[in-house]
Amino acid sequence: MTQERVLRVTVYYRDSSILEKVISTFRKLWVDIDWMNVRKTSDDGLYEIYMGVRDNKNTYIAILNLSKTVDVEKVEVLENARLVEYKFNEKGEVVKEGKYTMVVYVPVFSKVTSYSWGEVVGENIH
């Protein structure tokens, strides 16, 4: 069983390379990304990327490097996160059993540690 870190990355979408920047930050340090969900949060180009990354000796360095990346507003580590899995069929309905076309993981967590420009900028306990 591998340990996983669940992250919420807030980015400004100015061009399509932002996802490449996020992914390459982890891959160049040999940190595997298990899953990723992206959603638009505002009309001014602000997006949230939820992702699960494998926890190894380079994960913390990759998180700090990502927080220093241009167009990345902040990186939040969702501590003690457990994932609730939702499966959707072709019509967009949630299904418990049977055929599904998409799976979305929604993290439920108890603490958030925020990083911006390589520094801890906040901790919040829910």
Image (tube, rainbow, N blue to C red):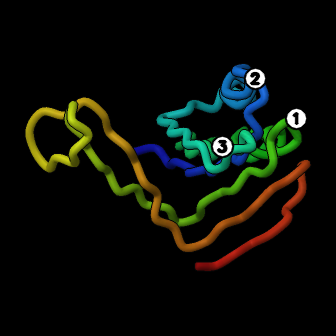
Q: Which residue is drawn at 74% across and 72% down?
A: 123
Which residue corresponds to mark 3? 47
Q: Residues within 10 Å of mark 3 (few under 14, many from 20)?
A: some
Amino acid residing under circle 2: Asp
- The Cα–Cα distance between marks 1 and 2, rounded to whole angstroms, is 12 Å
Task: List x then y, in percent, for residue 73.
Answer: 81, 48
The earlier-in-sequence mark between 1 and 3 is 3
Q: How crowded is mark 2: few (under 14 residues within 10 Å), some or many (20 or more)?
A: few
Disc assigned to residue 49? none
Side of 123 where 93 appears, left or right? left
- The Cα–Cα distance between marks 1 and 3, rounded to whole angstroms, is 14 Å
Q: Residue at x 85, y 62 (%)?
A: 120
Q: Residue at x 10, y 45 (%)?
A: 97
Which residue corresponds to mark 1? 70
Q: Which residue is drawn at 80% across and 41% down?
A: 72
Task: List x then y, in percent, for residue 111.
Answer: 61, 71
Amino acid residing under circle 1: Val
